[in-house]
Image (spheres, grey):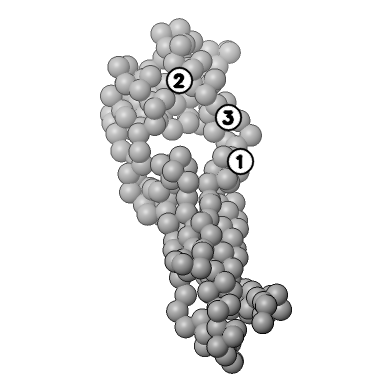
């Protein structure tokens, strides 16, 4: 989560008298909220840049919390459900275990699963839940387990082509799943904040002065 606060808002406005000073918290909170909204948009656009054909669920991962006059703090954050798999993409490191991998735990020694080269993928490039269920139910029939000769730590679930001449990898299981950071969530939110806050504050200040009661 990125929190957005402000110091020295009064310095942005050339003159503040005792009458208009009461409008400062309102204008600041409004500007921070608009800035957080811009941060959410920037973080969503970064998802499109960082990932190939992200799902609509992933594109809805970013939310923001508006500021109020008391705290003068807004926030941009990744929703809990999506944070489970996006966190390694932001910070790097080991990803969390996926529930569907439990289906194969008794058969395979590998813990982490990835789609194989011949896997049937949906429009977002992922294996659907139905496809994973089909593979799990087909073990011992159309689908079988292989171990890579050169890499005994890698195991595959595969099927044969219709002409029986090719082996078609469906799922690849490995003992480690480490990621390098690729989703620059913090960088783009901070940059959006720098880019838009002063403009948003001036607009909020002008609106507050125009609508205030003297």
Question: Quick check: can you spot residue 72?
Answer: yes
Is label 2 or label 1 in front?
Answer: 1
Q: Secondary structure at mark 3?
A: loop
Question: Quick check: can you spot residue 159?
Answer: no
Residue in the picture at 44% in, 26% down: 171
Q: Position of residue 26 (x, y in %)?
A: 57, 71
Residue in the picture at 32% in, 29% down: 111
Side (left or right) of 150 relative to 142: left
Q: Which residue is mark 3?
A: 121
Q: Position of residue 54 (x, y in %)?
A: 58, 43
Is 60 in front, or is 177? Answer: 60
Side (left or right) of 205 relative to 99: right
Q: Residue most toward the right?
A: 210
Q: Which residue is mark 1?
A: 56
Q: Earlier in the sequence, mark 3 or mark 1?
A: 1
Q: Position of residue 7 (x, y in %)?
A: 45, 79
Q: Which residue is mark 2?
A: 158
Q: Earlier in the sequence, mark 2 or mark 3?
A: 3
Q: Is residue 187 positioned above or below 77 on the image?
A: below
Is 81 in front, or is 152? Answer: 81
Q: Is residue 168 positioned above or below 31 on the image?
A: above
Q: Earlier in the sequence, mark 2 or mark 1?
A: 1
Q: Is residue 20 positioned above or below 137 on the image?
A: below
Side (left or right) of 170 relative to 27: left
Q: In the picture, residue 45 is in which quadrant?
A: bottom right
- Give the position of the C terminus as an image quadrant: bottom right
Q: Is residue 108 positioned above or below 27 on the image?
A: above
Is label 3 or label 1 in front?
Answer: 1
Q: Secondary structure at mark 1?
A: helix
């Amino acid at each position: 989560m990125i929190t957005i606060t402000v110091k020295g808002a009064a310095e942005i406005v050339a003159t503040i008298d005792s009458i208009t000073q009461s409008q400062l918290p309102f204008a600041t909170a409004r500007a921070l909220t608009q800035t957080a909204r811009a941060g959410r948009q920037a973080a969503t656009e970064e998802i499109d840049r960082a990932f190939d054909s992200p799902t609509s669920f992933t594109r809805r991962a970013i939310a923001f919390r508006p500021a109020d006059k008391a705290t003068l703090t807004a926030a941009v954050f990744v929703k809990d459900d999506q944070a489970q798999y996006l966190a390694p993409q932001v910070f790097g490191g080991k990803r969390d275990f996926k529930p569907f991998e439990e289906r194969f735990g008794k058969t395979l020694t590998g813990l982490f699963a990835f789609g194989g080269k011949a896997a049937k993928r949906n429009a977002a490039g992922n294996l659907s839940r139905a496809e994973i269920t089909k593979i799990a139910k087909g073990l011992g029939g159309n689908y079988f387990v292989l171990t890579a000769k050169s890499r005994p730590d890698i195991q595959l679930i595969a099927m044969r082509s219709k002409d029986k001449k090719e082996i078609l990898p469906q799922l690849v299981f490995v003992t480690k799943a480490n990621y390098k950071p690729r989703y620059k969530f913090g960088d783009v939110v901070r940059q959006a904040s720098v880019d838009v806050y002063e403009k948003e504050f001036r607009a909020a200040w002008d609106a507050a002065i125009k609508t205030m009661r003297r």
